[in-house]
Amino acid sequence: MTNYLKYLLIFSLFLAMGCKNPEPEVPEFPPIITVSGQNPLKTGIYMDFVDDSVKFSDRFGIDRFEMTDNVDTSLLGYYKVFYFTQSLSGMTAEAQRDVWTVVKPESMKGEWDVAWKILPSEDLPSFIDSLSVVGKKLIINNLNNVPELNIELSLAANLQDSVYIFEQYSSDSLYYIFGSGTIDERAMSMILNYSIVEESDTTRYQATYSRETISTK
C-alpha cells in the first residue's frame, strides 16, 4: 500500500470519528415529593405532631428539604403543612398536606376530677378518676364511683364532640349501662349522660370530667 493510500485511510478514520453523533443530553426533571398516608392526616390533641410518611427523591440526589407548618396540637382544627425540596442539580419541588387535630383515646389519658349527680339535680360526692387506654378504647376506670364497672368509651376521632358508651351488661346480668356525651374543643372537659338499668329500674346520671394540666406528650 502506497503512503498516499495509508494517509487517505487514516484521514477517513479521523473524519468518521469526528462526524460521530454526540451523546444525547439526559433530560432533567424536578425532584419528587411523595406524601403517603391519610390526607388529611389526623393527629391527637395534646400529642406530638410527627409526619414520617413523606419521602423526597431525585436521580441526582437531594440537596436540601424543608417542612413548615402551623399545627397547634393544643386546639382541635384544620392546619396546613408545606414541603419543599431542592435537588443537587438545582431543581425544586413543593407539596402540601392537610392536618386535622382530633380527639384520640391517647389524648384523654390521665387523672380527671369528676362532679357527679343523679339527674335531674341531685348532687353526689365528687371523686377522681384516672382514664386509661386499652387498644383503641378509652377506659373509664371509676364510672359511678364503682371501679369494677370498667366502662369502655368510643371516642369520635374527628372534630365532632360526641362520645358514647357501649351498652354493657354486668356479669350477673342484673343491669346494663348506656349513654353519650360531649368533649370540649380543648379536650379539657367531658360531660357524660348515662343510665344504669337494674332489673326494671332505670337511674339517669351525669358525670362532668375536668382537668387542669395535660401530661400526654
Image (cartoon, helix red, strand yellow):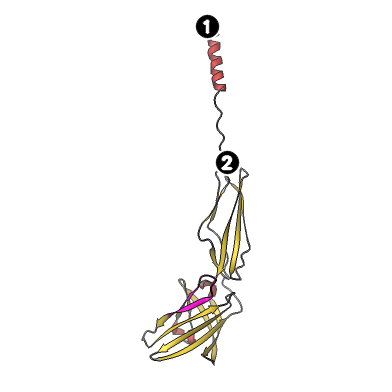
Label 1's element?
Answer: loop
Which mark, residue 113?
Answer: none
Nearer the observer, 216 or 210: 210
Say which residue label 2 marks: 28
Quadrant of the drawing holding the C terminus: bottom right
Q: Is residue 11 magenta?
A: no
Lower sequence index among marks 2 and 1: 1
Find the residue positioned furthest to the top: 2
| 61 lies above or below 95 | above
User: Which residue shows up at 61% across the image and 53% down it?
Assistant: 84
Q: Which secondary structure class fits the magenta region best?
A: strand
User: Which residue shows up at 52% across the image and 86% down it?
Assistant: 206
Q: How many marks?
A: 2
Q: As shown in the figure, which amino acid type bears the numbered disc 1?
A: Thr
Q: As shown in the figure, which amino acid type bears the numbered disc 2?
A: Glu
- The magenta segment: 152-166
Q: Is residue 163 magenta?
A: yes
Say which residue label 1 marks: 2
Crowding at mark 2 (Cα within 10 Å: few <14, some 14-19, many 20+) = few
Specify the quadrant of the image occupied by residue 88: top right
| 11 lies above or below 39 | above
